[in-house]
Image: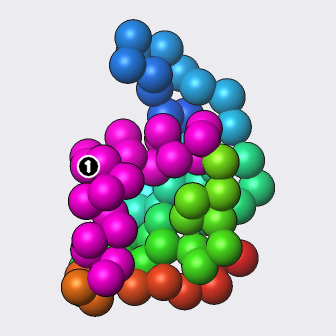
Amino acid sequence: MKTSIENMCSENGNPVCNQFIIRTGKSVIFQSYNSMIVKITNKNTYLDTYYWDYSKTTGKYRNLFLGETKKETEQKIKKGIYKLKNLN
C-alpha cells in the first residue's frame, strides 16, 4: 500500500492547515505541524510523550482523530491501553 497524506478537516468539513493524517501500510498517524502526535498500529496506539497534549489546537485535532475527549484519552493512558512513547 502506498503512503497517503491528507489534511484533517474541521467540524465544518474544511481542510485544516498543519494538521495531517498519514496512512502507511502498517499504521495511521496524526501529525500536528512537524510533530507526530499519535501512531496507531495493528496492535497498539502510541501517543508522543511530550507532544500529545502540547497545545489547545493539537488537543482539539487529537480528540477528533481518536474520536474521544481528553479525559477519555487520559484514562486510556492510565490503564495502559494507550502507550506514551517518544515518536519524534
Q: Is residue 77 above or below residue 21?
A: below
| Quadrant of the rendering where the N terminus is positioned | bottom left
Residue at horizontal 59 percent and vertical 79 percent from the top: 49
Q: Quadrant of residue 31?
A: bottom right
Where residue 56 appears, as percent x and y from the top left, is: 60, 41
Q: Is residue 35 magenta?
A: no
Give the quarter of the figure containing the C terminus: bottom right
Q: Secondary structure at mark 1?
A: loop
Instruction: Give yes or no for residue 68 being in the magenta stretch.
Output: yes
Q: Which residue is mark 1?
A: 68
Q: Main secondary structure of the magenta part?
A: helix
**What x and y, as percent, mark residue 23?**
44, 58
Amino acid marked by disc 1? Glu
Q: Specify start and end residues of the magenta stretch as a single range.
A: 56-78
Number of labels in the image equals 1
Is residue 47 toward the left or the right of residue 63 in the image? right
